Image: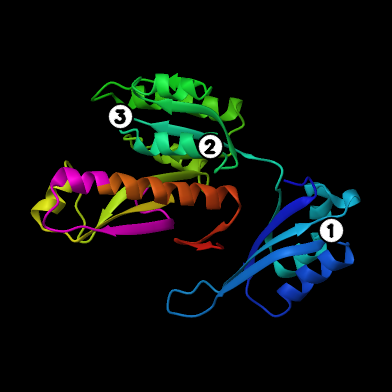
Amino acid sequence: MSPQEFVLTLSCRDTVGIVHTVSGLLYQAGCNILDSQQFGDVQGDDATGLFFMRVHFAAPPHLADASVLDTLFAHARQQFGMTLRFHARAQRMRVTLMVSRQGHCLNDLLFRHASGQLAIDIPAVVSNHADFEPLVRSHGIPFHHLSLAPGASADDKRLQEQQIEALIERERVDLVVLARYMQILSPALCQRLSGRAINIHHSFLPSFKGARPYAQAHARGVKLIGATAHYVTADLDEGPIIEQDVARVDHAQSADDLSAVGRDVECVVLARALRWHAEHRVLINGHKTVVFR
């Protein structure tokens, strides 16, 4: 990616003149807009009244620095009350993957990373089990086994999370992906990673929770199974949704067949959510997201 390419993301109260101001400032600075998308959440009972925008542009050499561009928009930020950020396209996001004993999402993300389908860096993989250490190390990525015994006390869990927090700080991690990490993060860690942690879980119509969800779905004759990728919050599996997808199944398929289909859907949905976040296409809108695809 060119060191002169940037992505501008912003949100503010919806009002007249935002697009004109943003495009005008970029034009006056000699920038070339390559792609621009916007959305105003002003309709419906749950509308937030906010405006969202993503602009991909190329800057002239003397402006090819996020801090310089940020200064250029100082007055507009104040005028419109913008939450605004510039992201250098050449700067790859640093992503830590966390996994337990279901490795399908981990394996899929490692392959996509190795084959160049995900433009990210993976400085570490963390697990509470050692099962996938050989797989991770075969990709040349450090593996951190931070064990947590069944029935671990709150103090033990907090100690393990402190190790995770230290790793995130040390490796300058931008995003944490729970690639089937089967431990509930504490409210404190959820808060620290707000907007910087993505989880994946199965989703059924109707919904089944607890042990053996695919067996429950099979017993009820479910026809659609799917997966949801969302930002992590202290409310379990209820954070802002980034992406979802479903696959159709029928009576001829066993519970194991449903589980296999579900694993495939989970891999695809998580990979999409990660790629869109890494490309700065996702903006959080309260309990929802705006995704510029």
Q: Amino acid at mark 3?
A: Arg
Check the image and tell me how it is coloured. Answer: rainbow
- The front one of 262 and 169 is 262
Residue shown at 13%/47% (left/top)? 254
Nearer to us: label 1 or label 3: 3
Residue type, label 1: Leu
Instruction: Evaluate whether residue 255 shows in this view.
Output: yes
Residue 107: percent from the left, percent from the top?
41, 34
Front position among marks 2 and 3: 2
Q: Quadrant of the C terminus?
A: bottom right
**Mark 2 burial class by Cα count in 10 Å: few <14, some 14-19, many 20+:** some
Q: Position of residue 141 (x, y in %)?
A: 52, 24
Q: Which residue is mark 3?
A: 101
Q: Position of residue 33 (x, y in %)?
A: 76, 64
In the image, residue 139 lies at what x, y percent?
A: 50, 25
Q: Which residue is mark 1?
A: 72
Sequence-first disc among 1 and 3: 1
The answer to whether 23 appears left or right of 202 in the picture is: right
Residue depicted at 35% across the width and 19% down the height: 130
Residue under circle 2?
Answer: 113
- Extent of the magenta region: 232-260
Q: Tell me, yes or no, if residue 233 can be seen here.
A: no
Examine the structure image and report whether residue 237 is included in the region drawn in magenta. yes
238 sits to left or right of 1: left
Q: Is residue 176 magenta?
A: no
Please state which amino acid type lies under the numbered disc 2. His
Q: CA distance from mark 2 to mark 1?
A: 35 Å
How far is mark 1 from mark 3, CA to CA? 48 Å
Q: What is the C-alpha distance between the residues marked 2 and 3?
A: 20 Å
Report the side of 256 relative to 182 (left or right): left
